[in-house]
Image (cartoon, rainbow, N blue to C red):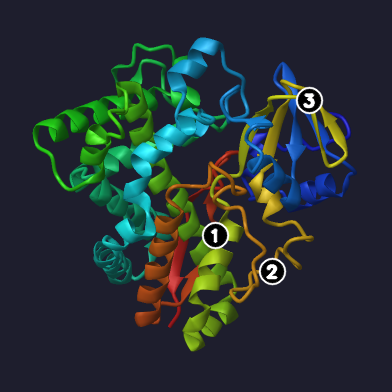
Amino acid sequence: MTGMIDIADPRLYVHGIPHESFRQVRDQPGLMWHPHGDNGFWAVTRHVDVKSVSTEPTVFSSAIGHTNLWDLEADALDARRSIIDSDAPDHTRLRRLVSKVFTPRALRAWEDATRLITRDVLDDFAKEGGGDWVDLVAAPLPIRVILSILGVPLEDGNYLVDLSNYLIEGTTDEPSLADDAFGNTTEVRLLPFNSPASHAMYEYADQIGAQRREDPRPDVVTHLVQAEDDGDRLSRAEYRNMFHILVLGGNETTRTGISHGALALANNPEQWERLKNDTSLMDTAVEEILRISTPLMHMRRTAATDTELAGTSITEGDKVVMWYNSANFDEDAFPDPNRFDIGRDHAGHQAFGGGGPHFCLGAFLARMELRVLLEEMLDRNMMLTTVGDPQRAPSNFVHGILSMEMAMRS
């Protein structure tokens, strides 16, 4: 790609977000056209423009085309369609059927359980005298929380984490699974992330869903299989895709936030001391961790009509990609954006999307998990330091850390 950095190249992310490349794109007038595959997309990289796309769903559609970078045939889009790939009224209907279990009031009931899980994983980390923060804390904490909420047996957690890892591999240039892995017989183009791990996730969803129909319990899986609004219920495909999203979102994205939060605090010990001396900064500390983490780095929309954005003419059918990892480091929204500042006055970071109808259902849960983790670390005076460099996921979609050796400061 002559004269331009390919911001869609997964290899560009093995050392973290390429901030300088995104700054150069933001500094260009209008939007940048980015060739990709057989066509390309408009790269939306400024905070204000990402918000505009997010809050105008009738202009920038999630349903017309896929919300990831690659194009899909019509049958693949139908097979893989989830709440993320829907517009009103379908999106409104799906969100109404499931949203009541993800309200702040409903999720507060899980704070005590989250605290017990957090204490358990931090105790394990301390007993080991440190180690791989991802393996010991960032991965087990959110998966145990989301599985408890869903009603999935905790002993199945490692299996679902492995499936999530394989799904993220689908956004890298190094997928390791054969198409028939996990007994898959479906064309992978019809599966989320083009991965046979999605087949395994669907199979697991069917199994646990059948159990809850026979033996209802006060958990989210029971709610999903029983959810009804004026006689309307989730179809089998809708249920499987919703389960898929909840496991991946409740596991992978929060894991990313916990990983980057620990790394930022270890690299900025003065911010840890600041929080320890002034816990009134807890809420802004959580928001700053979410901003610098930006667990999901982009989402795509398709122009439903001819329009204009940032002075650029966009034609009906054009693909438009919002880069949250650029918007969250936009100097116009966040002065000195590369500085980690737990007292920062946030201008609406976009770690959960840029607002609008697709604002993340699990936002409150992620905030609660991060807050509880910081509170428990403060109680232990658990100040961290890095041991070597983190191993990052070569993904243009998830801002993931695969492993990260950490020790406790004496």
Sooner in the amino-acid sequence: mark 1 or mark 2: 1
| Count of numbered badges drawn on the protein | 3
Instruction: Give the label, 1 or 2, closer to the camera.
Output: 1
Categorize mark 3 by other alpha carbons within 10 Å: few (<14), some (14-19), many (20+).
Answer: few
Do the residues under discs 2 and 3 have CB atoms within 8 angstroms? no
The spot of residue 221 in percent (x, y) is 24, 39
Question: What residue sits right under mark 3 in the picture?
Answer: 306
Q: Secondary structure at mark 3?
A: loop
For residue 279, say whether it is visible: yes
Where on the picture, by quarter, is residue 137?
A: bottom left
Q: Nearer the viewer, residue 314 or 325?
A: 314
Seen at 39% across and 47% down, the residue is 250
Which of labels 1 and 3 is toward the front?
Answer: 3
Find disc 1 in the rendering and name its residue: 290
Tag 3 or tag 2, which sits nearer the N-term?
3
Q: Residues within 10 Å of mark 2 (few under 14, many from 20)?
A: some
- Nearer-the-camera pick, 187 or 207: 207
SS assignment at label 2: loop
Can you tell which quarter of the image residue 222 is in?
A: top left
Q: Is residue 296 above or below residue 40?
A: below
Left or right: 2 as drawn, with respect to 105: right
Of badges 2 and 3, nearer the viewer stands 3
Amino acid type at mark 1: Leu
In the depicted structure, whether residue 244 falls above or below residue 335:
above
Q: Residue at x 46, y 24 (%)?
A: 81
Amino acid at pointer 3 = Asp
Residue 328: x, y in percent? 67, 55
- The residue that mark 2 highlights is 339
Q: Position of residue 179 (x, y in %)?
A: 41, 16
Q: Earlier in the sequence, mark 1 or mark 3?
A: 1
